[in-house]
Image (spheres, helix red, strand yellow):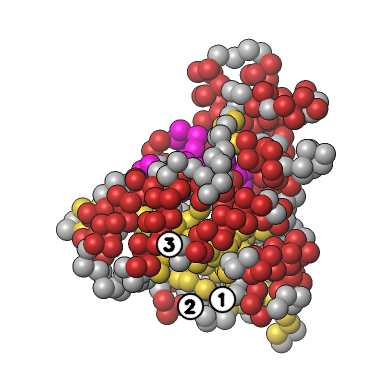
Amino acid sequence: MQKSCRYKAYSLNNFRDIPQMERLPEEIKFDIEVVGHVLPFKANNFVVDHLIDWDRVPADPLFLLTFPQRDMLLPHHYEEMAALLKGGADRAELKAAANRIRLQLNPHPAGQISHNIPSLDGENLDGMQHKYRETVLFFPSQGQTCHAYCSFCFRWPQFVGLSDLKFASREVDRLIDYLQTNPQVTDVLFTGGDPLIMSARNLAQYIEPLLEADLPNLRRIRIGTKALSYWPYRFLSDNDTEDLLALFRKVGENGKHLALMAHFNHPRELAPEPVRQAIAQIRQAGAIIRTQSPLLRHINDDPALWIQMWNEQVDLGCVPYYMFIARDTGAQHYFNVPLVRAWEIFREAYRQVGGLCRTVRGPSMSANPGKVQVLGTSEVMGEKVLQLRFIQARNPDWVHRPFFARYDEQATWLSDLKPAFGEERFFYQKEFEQDYRENLEEGHPEDYE
Ligand code: SF4
């Protein structure tokens, strides 16, 4: 086991202390302050010292991934916050303005947290979501933050103190009750934030009861995490690393499959030696690592990067899983790639990698009706169309049925698309609108995982 590494966290309060910041013009530091007052910002010494290439800042993709940028706010929002900061506004004024702007960035509205929330004996199980038949999402309360914040993250509202938007649960007993009364559920996904920010002891308080309970239907435990990229020492040298790896082993010893759903947005995140060692440690503990990322303008909108990423992931023993479309919230205008271009990038990369990399699925939108994959463009009876299908859906009967939208080079999300061939609605829409009207009105609460 290697020597422990000291953790140093950076936020808006102390980012100017980062030694590499000295090289940057004041204008960029001010932009970080302005945008960081609206969108969440947090980094640590591993991100700063091992991931960001400071010779390429400000264009460096890992810098853009973790540090707020001027264009992540719309110009009038930026100007409003900048004027307040320059004018010496007090904390209350800054907070009020920030919240006003945040509410215009399509955060998940307060009522939305009631969507997909399962119930048991007439009582809502807050801190859980159940959208797809086989999988329940569980949001452990101590895992609702991250080692660093990704600037594209659709969970941004829960990191900026809009507390009524938080998901959280300590109720593992209720989860067990729910799993016992829902034998169709085979998978539990621990998600956040990043559940692996929790101590091994806290994580065990959630996982061990699942292993000890009588749950023959529960086959797989998944943990969504970015710790491999942002703090690989979690699996190498933290005080409780041994306990964490022992817990991973215990899952397998109890006959369950453990999968780490790891976020990697750029191939550089796979390069540091601690990351490679951490992957090896996790695999030795019997867990499978599946990898996923949204396709992000400025960061990874180049097929060559995906080819490199998928190849290296497979070489390291990981399984490429998803390429997502950036979601319609927060700084989406900064990151989005039109669906047609996203498909071109996916195809260009996919056709140049071997079969073991082709476990990846995408590009996929985690939209309200389900995960919609863009299969490509074609021409049918003289009409140019986009071909789509559900990878996952609220109604399992919708899955893998091809459907068609009018060709639209600008569309960036499912809601931008219109049905092809003069149809008024997509095949699933009538049922969806009847059953999920409330969700339609209030937004898109689904998860990347
Ligand atoms: S994408 Fe994952 S790791 Fe990044 S900020 Fe969001 S929840 Fe945290």
Disc 3 packing (10 Å; few <14; some 14–19; many ≥20): many
Task: Give the residue pinned by disc 3.
Answer: 222
Residue 117 visible in the shown view = no
Mark 1 vs ligand 1: CB below 8 Å: no
Q: Is mark 2 in CB contact (under 8 Å) with mark 1?
A: yes
Residue 82 visible in the shown view = yes
Disc 2 packing (10 Å; few <14; some 14–19; many ≥20): some
Residue at image x 52%, y 58%?
281
Q: Which residue is nearer to you in this view: 273 or 104?
A: 273
Q: Which residue is nearer to you in this view: 8 or 74?
A: 8
Question: As shown in the figure, which amino acid type bears the numbered disc 3?
Answer: Arg
The span from disc 2 to disc 3 (Cα, nearest Å) is 22 Å
- Residue 389: mark in rendering: 1
Question: As shown in the figure, which amino acid type bears the numbered disc 1?
Answer: Arg
Question: As shown in the figure, which amino acid type bears the numbered disc 2?
Answer: Val
Residue at image x 23%, y 55%?
174
Q: Image check: 109 left or right of 236?
A: left
What range of the chain is rendered magenta? Answer: 141-162
Q: Which residue is nearer to you in this view: 307 or 131?
A: 307
Q: Image check: 81 left or right of 176?
A: right
Q: Image check: 124 left or right of 137?
A: left
Q: Is residue 235 above or below residue 81?
A: below
Pointer 2 or 3: first along the chain: 3
The span from disc 2 to disc 1 (Cα, nearest Å) is 7 Å
Q: Is residue 180 above or below residue 301?
A: below
Residue 438, quarter of picture: bottom left
- Residue 399: mark in rendering: 2
Is 344 within the magenta?
no
Q: Is mark 2 in CB contact (under 8 Å) with mark 3?
A: no
